[in-house]
Amino acid sequence: MTLDPAPLVDPRTFVDGVPYDLLAALREATPVVWVDEPPLLGLPGGPGFWLVLRHADVTDVLRQPRLFSSWLGATQIRDPATEDDLGYVRRMMLNMDPPEHGRLRRPVARSFTPRAVAALEASIRANATRLVERALGEADEGVCDFARDLAADLPLLTLADVLGVPESDRWLLYDWSNRVIGFQDPDRAVSAAFDPRSGTAAAREALRHRPAPDADGRMPDPRTRAGMADLYAYAHLLAEAKRREPGPDVMSILLARDGDDRLSVEEFENMFWLFAVAGNETIRNGLPGAMIALLEHPAQMARLRRDPSLFDTAVDELLRWWTPVMVFRRTATSDTAIAGVPVRAGDKVVVSFASANRDERVFADPDRLDLGRHPNPHLVFGHGPHFCLGAHLARCQLRALFDALLARTTRITYAGTPTYLRSTFQRGVKRLPIHWRRQAPHTPQGFL
């Protein structure tokens, strides 16, 4: 039987969940498979790409930036529409190769070390507790949308602290992430959740630059500068404020650079784009994904309630099981081979984190959630020089939110069917209704 990888390029496939059975069959048959790119959902066709399926080969690709470049064709599967668009996104750290990549990464990396994240932990835990109490209210039991009421807001509050964005403007970041990550999903592509009446004057000014949908209801490509004009307008207004009153935040650190280390306008804009979008979206979808993992494995949820020390391994296992970012692209710089499969210079090479994190060669019984799994060499945060800066921050947020929620409830179940993002890139959760029952207040011994 010939296995057809075509469903993997159709974002509509993922509305029903990741086709793990197909990935497993492909992974067993071959380490690397060719995938065609037909015209789809208003997007033009492409030249096709090599999909890398096994854990060992994914790590090999990611640790060889000279051979598999982030810069040559950027890191999204679909090629940018024009050479100008490609040139612009190449000024983003995500789309750079060493040594240019390191020039931008090093100054901000210290904001994301374990020590730096530890300094933010009290604030993250306080925000998580406040969000959980707000969602539960005073009732003994009830229903809420975990994706919107809890998972969306915690990363926004955290990111506002890290970036130096006023808390009142944080839902701008939500809309920007929706438009960038959800551009294949009509529910997200025109996101407008931010209420300008609640934001700063800078936010209201930035909204004047927000692009409008065309006659077919489509927004411009968010990988172009015109497609995110409001984000870039806000970035420059924020920069003006940080130059007047710098702080310990990432934007102030970037703006303090001078001489040969000074960022170009394009680099600054792209850096803000990267933190505002990528810094929010992965953990925003990792949180409801972790909730789904526990709902699907109630014995594991009970295990975590009984033994909170299990969080030390549980956080990584929850992230592995869900894997928010499913794929990333590289481009071959010369003729080579991956696991013996010939690859030509200029070919697109796409690594599948969704497949690698379920690879039977690395993870015993990979479809099963095991909160005590150790070792756990998952690739949720990537590998090599582009390993995610925010890994420690993401782990801290996940632990804080579930620690707060499980401590205040005795039971959590589905209150409806989750709905998933229409995307080939991000394993997103749009809605996740849950029913919860509150933990009874502690009764002093002898009171009864």
Image (cartoon, helix red, strand yellow):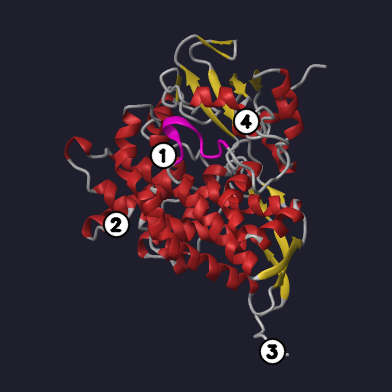
Q: Which mark is residue 248?
A: 2
| N-terminal-most mark, 2 or 4 | 2
- Is residue 192 visible to the viewer in this orientation of the structure? no
- Name which residue lies at 69% across and 90% down: 447
Relative image position of residue 56 (x, y in whole percent): 58, 24
Q: Which of marks 4 and 3 is in front?
A: 3
Residues marked 3 and 1 touching at CB (< 8 Å): no
Point out the residue furthest to the right here.
1
Secondary structure under tag 4 reads helix
Q: Which mark is residue 356?
A: 4
Residue type at mark 2 is Pro
- Is residue 271 visible to the viewer in this orientation of the structure? yes
What distance separates the C-alpha of mark 4 from that of mark 3?
A: 54 Å
Residue type at mark 4 is Ala
| N-terminal-most mark, 1 or 2 | 1
Q: In the image, which residues are magenta?
A: 377-388
- Name which residue lies at 25% across and 48% down: 255
Residue type at mark 3 is Gly
What distance separates the C-alpha of mark 1 from that of mark 2?
A: 28 Å
Relative image position of residue 37 (x, y in whole percent): 63, 23
Q: How many discs mark residues in the rendered view?
A: 4
Relative image position of residue 40 (x, y in whole percent): 66, 30
Residue under numbered circle 3: 446
What distance separates the C-alpha of mark 4 from that of mark 1?
A: 33 Å
